[in-house]
Image: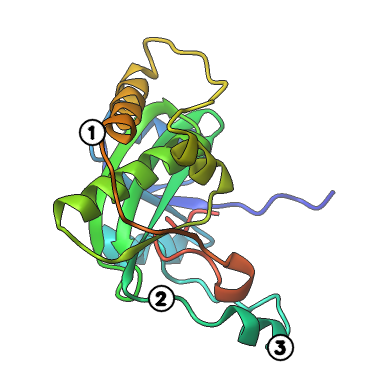
């Protein structure tokens, strides 16, 4: 196996801000800190430069994507519908520190964000993001569609349930409190929003991606 590449972590908001050379050091700054802002970078210089900027200018950016599909396949799929919002979640470990957000698909302008939470999973975050998106669009009486790259989240929303195997405990109670609210919202509300699977192979990472892969 090849040697794992070293990463550097910029923390804009945490117990201490700065550039940290290990995930454990970064994690110590963001654990139990509401609204923590952080991101990994490939070099120390990039992380240091980012610290002088704005968190929202970096998440989900600075990546170059190439389609994995042929020209003919791309023609069949077409382009994304920009009359939409996109949602995604990020989990540092599974379970681990988790957060989710929704953005305007075209501009990547952030519409909502929740977390980071002390313990969650990517599937839980994707589910919460999707229901939050449905609620957001209904509240604004919007005809926009909703993109997610999670088939699991789509299935849970369709069934109006959450089938996570993560055992409930005191650490993940804030997440499960939101999950319970989300399930109740699905049961008690009708919505007209069309949920569409984001075609990652054709279009690259979903615009709401946190850019920490």
Q: Nearer the viewer, residue 161 or 54?
A: 161
**What is the CA distance from the residue labelled 1 to the residue labelled 2?**
33 Å
Q: Quadrant of the C terminus?
A: bottom right
**Label 3: how many Cα within 10 Å (few below 14, some 14–19, many 20+):** few
Of mark 2 and mark 3, the one earlier in the sequence is 3
Image depth: mark 1 or mark 2 in front: 2
- Which residue is painted at 57% across and 48% down in the image? 151
Residue 16 placement (x, y as % from top left): 26, 38
Label 1 residue SS: loop
The answer to whether 131 appears left or right of 3 in the picture is: left
What residue would you read off at disc 2? 81
Callout 1 crowding tier (Cα within 10 Å): few <14, some 14–19, many ≥20: some
Residue drawn at x 49%, y 54% as measured from the top left: 212
- Dots 3, 1 in contact, CB < 8 A: no
Is the residue 189 above or below the residue 3 in the image? above
**Residue plotted at (62% across, 87% down):** 75
Residue beneath disc 3: 72
Residue 84, image x, y percentages: 33, 68
- Crowding near the residue tagged with mark 2, few <14, some 14–19, many ≥20 C-alpha atoms within 10 Å: some
Q: CA distance from mark 2 to mark 3?
A: 19 Å
Could you say where residue 152 lies in the image, as x and y percent from the top left? Answer: 56, 41
Q: Nearer the viewer, residue 61 or 173?
A: 173
Q: Is residue 22 left or right of residue 51?
A: right
First in residue order: circle 1 vs circle 2: 1
Horizontal relation, residue 120 to residue 67: left or right:
left
Q: Which residue is mark 1?
A: 34
Q: Is residue 31 visible?
A: no
Q: How many marks?
A: 3
Q: Earlier in the sequence, mark 3 or mark 1?
A: 1
Against 185, residue 58 (above or below) is: below
């Amino acid at each position: 196996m090849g040697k794992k590449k070293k990463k550097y972590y910029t923390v804009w908001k945490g117990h201490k801000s700065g550039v940290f050379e290990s995930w454990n050091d970064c994690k110590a700054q963001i654990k139990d800190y509401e609204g923590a802002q952080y991101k990994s970078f490939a070099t120390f210089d990039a992380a240091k430069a980012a610290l002088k900027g704005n968190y929202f200018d970096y998440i989900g950016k600075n990546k170059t994507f190439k389609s994995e599909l042929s020209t003919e396949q791309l023609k069949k799929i077409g382009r994304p519908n920009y009359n939409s919002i996109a949602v995604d979640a990020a989990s540092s470990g599974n379970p681990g520190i988790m957060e989710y957000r929704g953005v305007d698909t075209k501009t990547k302008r952030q519409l909502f964000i929740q977390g980071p939470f002390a313990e969650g999973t990517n599937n839980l975050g994707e589910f919460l993001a999707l229901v939050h998106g449905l609620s957001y669009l209904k509240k604004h009486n919007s005809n926009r569609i909703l993109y997610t790259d999670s088939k699991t989240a789509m299935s849970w929303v369709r069934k109006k349930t959450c089938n996570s195997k993560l055992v409930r405990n005191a650490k993940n109670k804030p997440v499960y409190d939101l999950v319970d609210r989300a399930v109740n919202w699905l049961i008690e509300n009708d919505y007209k929003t069309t949920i569409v699977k984001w075609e990652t192979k054709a279009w690259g990472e979903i615009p709401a991606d946190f850019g920490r892969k």
